[in-house]
Amino acid sequence: MNRTIHAFLLATILILVCVACLNTTPEATTEPEQLTIITHDSFDVGEDVIQEFEAQFNAKINILKAGDAGEVLNKSILSKGNPLGDVLYGIDNTFLTRALDEQIFLPYQSPALSNVPAQYHVDATHRVMPIDYGFVAINYDKKWMQEQNLTPPQNLQELASDKWSGKLVVQNPATSSPGLAFLLTTVAHFGETGTYTYLDYWRDLKDNQTLIKNGWSDAYYGDFTLYGGDRPLVVSYTTSPAAEVFYSEGVHSEPPTGNVLGPKTAFLQIEGAGILLGTNHVELAQHFIDFAMGVTFQQDFPTRMWVFPVNPEAVLDRTFAEFAEIPSNPATLDPHVISKNRAKWIDEWAKIMLR
């Protein structure tokens, strides 16, 4: 009798254990899959947005900030095949061809690409998907202009006139992303051949006492008259006036700065993301690319990184929508042309401006 009861109890326990195992979902016992995003120091996306992705895909996102866009690319090239991360976020059209030539990305065409306007499709081989875009342009101090009874310059040519002598601060293209974009603007605008080239223009800017700074922050917060400097013109972004309103905490109801938006005076930068060759998390990386092109992600970063979303369905913050300007005729250059000539253009610029 005791043996019968013992056998019955044992069988009951085994049945209960099996039922418990059947009722346990894989998610409850599976550790989140790790995904590392290597990106530039300016990357800023809401923690709640990252958490939404993590919850949806049982993932843990690690953000690895590795310097400016050029540094991130260099580190990714040096670690090709054994990458520091799974996804590179922040490769733009000024460095794109170099990245593609180095073959550091796996091909992936996100279904979300069909919703992105064609002018932002940066890579026909579908190794880099577009995420955002922006424009580097000359900003001016409105109050300074009013006090001096001056009309802001309307185009690049005006900046080289005596009227604006000693009034402009720009960044070194060898050390600054907006500095490089402004150099590319002058190449696109004036060209390399003819009676007046981009090098002629830079000679005139030098003669006009243009100030060179290594980085955007030093130029904008150190030399721009808006923040106590003596230069009312600075190379920045067309979204900077909107940012001034957004961060003013009600002090400004309209931007204290404006943009110089004549033909080909602002340079279009398109930023994308790609899956790094050698990742062990290809499927999750693909999900992240799709997510980054989706509405939740796209409408979060404009007032964090001050760039435009490529997804037209993203709803923009009111201040961003009202004051972040899109030039009607921006300067552009083919990424292959940039890649082929970038080093030469910077070297030629340095021979004029730094000697």
Image (tube, rainbow, N blue to C red):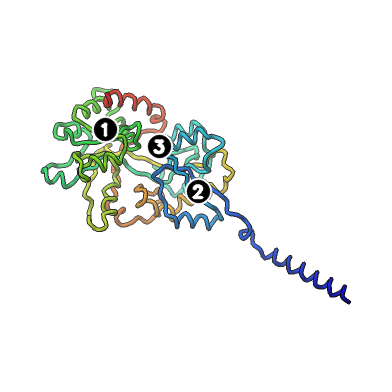
> What residue type is disc 3 on?
Asn
Q: Which of the two discs, 1 and 3, sits closer to the camera?
A: 1
Any mark on residue 104, and which? none
* Residue neighbourhood size for the residue with mark 3, other residues' Cα within 10 Å, grouped as few (<14), some (14–19), many (≥20): many
Q: Are marks 2 and 1 in contact (CB under 8 Å)?
A: no
Q: Residues within 10 Å of mark 1 (few under 14, many from 20)?
A: some
- The answer to whether residue 291 is left or right of residue 262 is right
First-in-chain label (2 vs 1): 2
Q: Residue 79: x percent and y percent?
A: 52, 35
Quarter the N terminus occupies: bottom right
The secondary element bearing badge 1 is classed as strand
Label of residue 93 in the image: 3
| 306 relative to 203, above or below | below
Residue type, mark 2 in image: Asn
Tell me if I can see residue 329 in this picture. no
Question: Mark on residue 212?
Answer: 1
- Residue type at mark 1: give it: Ile
Find residue 3 and report its horizontal and vertical position in percent: 87, 73
x 82%, y 73%: residue: 8
Residue furthest to the bottom in view is 1
Q: Sequence-wise, which precedes: disc 1 or disc 3? A: 3
| 118, 244: nearer the viewer | 244
For disc 2, the neighbor class at 10 Å (few under 14, some 14 to 19, many from 20) is some
Distance from the alpha carbon under mark 2 to that under mark 1: 36 Å
Residue matched to label 2: 62
